[in-house]
Image (cartoon, rainbow, N blue to C red):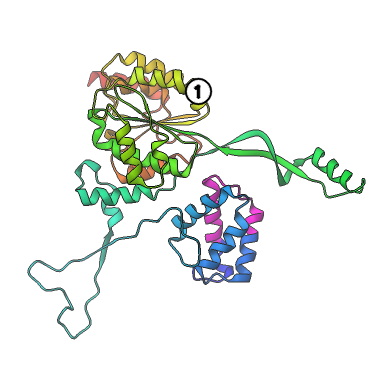
Amino acid sequence: MNAGPEHAVEPVVEFAGRLRASGASVPPTRVHMMLRALAELGADSLSAVYWSGRLTLCASPDDIERYDQVFSAYFGAGQGRPRPRVQVAPAYRMVAAPADGQPETGAKNDGPPPEKLATASRHEVLRNRDVTELTAAERAEVNHYLSALVIAVPERITRRMRAAPGGTIDARRTIRAMMRRGGEPVEVLRHRKSRRTRRLVFLIDVSGSMAPYADTVLRFAHAACRARPGTEVFTVGTRLTRLTRELRGRGAAAAIAKASQAIPDWSGGTRLGPEVKEFLDRWGQRGVARGAVVVLASDGWEQGDPTLLGEQMARLRRLARRVVWVNPHRGHDGYAPRTGGMRAALPHIDDLVAGHSLGAMEDLAILLTTTTSCTPWPGTHRLQDATEAVSDA
């Protein structure tokens, strides 16, 4: 950010917007305070930008972790600030390579080497590749990108009030302040309703048909658990397994290893209906799914009666704020919801998204920050026509 304070308004406002989307309370007054701090400290140093924002945009200790994560993702790793909690994946660049059998240009040439043209970043090369087609080295690189994702979910307004510069008059606090001063008039204190992030719940199918993709979704869930302590993760297959405790570790490799040891039915069968029912009976109905954003990752293959799955998805839809279904086959050309499980669940989900690649996981992270559904299949008002079309096919 090598620019003067007058040129820093647009990036600061955009950065504050991303911080606000991550769950921090960033009113416009704090954005103005950061700009004033930059005017004093200067915007030539990334360290000055970091401390200007941290001292002005963070309203509580809980915001510091969010601030570090968003700052790392937006500005990249910088100097003069504490060690970031999330390491930003390095940007790899693909350049034009010399032809086979020819020495590298400029290796034994006294003249200046010709300019190498960048063709695409390594991230873009891997972004749209199906994870089942990756080599071991490419999969490790994709896992590194997944661990650096910053995942945020929409907020909800609670009934609890908190002190704020603006809002309605807080009569009790104002009167108590006056009494402490012997009845002398004081500044009118105000408060407003506090905001809390919605709970994020994952139900991940680990059956045999989902095994190639389940690891990617588990890593995405681990990134969510690290960013949002209230995130809950369950696996479904032939039995329901809660993995929230195992995935709360900071290291992705260690957390995934613990989770794998805790899953007794990896690459087994699929009993989505009974497992969703067990989740709702034991956890969802008691509060885990109430008002939450529920992400169910499965290809929809159901060994049991699809009618039971449809009934339980209807229960889940009544409890949850939003239901997102991640189907790896959604990202393939010519996909249609032909399986009985998908057709039974379609009327009760808000979004049907792909989950086959790094790009699909990044799109899912962006989708979870929105407040409205944007990728339904094919839309509740067209569901009957689509189902009839699939049946005719």
Please identify the dominant SS of the magenta region.
Answer: helix
Q: Image quadrant of residue 206?
A: top left
**In the rendered image, which quarter contains the C terminus?**
top left
Residue 92, percent from left and from top: 30, 60
In the picture as drawn, the residue positioned furthest to the left comes out as 101
In the picture as drawn, the residue positioned furthest to the bottom comes out as 110
The residue depicted at 27 percent of the width and 26 percent of the height is 265
Span of residues in magenta: 10-32
Viewed as shown, does residue 126 lie left or right of 51? Answer: left
> How packed is label 1: few (under 14 Cα within 10 Å), some, or many (20 or more)?
many
Viewed as shown, does residue 248 lie left or right of 174? Answer: left
Residue 329, percent from left and from top: 26, 33
For label 1, the SS is: helix
The residue depicted at 33 percent of the width and 60 percent of the height is 91
**Residue 333 visible within the image:** no
Q: What residue type is labelled 1?
A: Leu
Residue 313, percent from left and from top: 41, 20
Q: What residue does disc 1 label?
A: 319
Viewed as shown, does residue 44 lie left or right of 337? Answer: right
**Residue 188 visible within the image:** yes
Q: Image quadrant of residue 122?
A: bottom left
Query: Does the magenta portion include 19?
Result: yes
Query: Does the magenta portion include 263?
Result: no
Q: How many marks?
A: 1
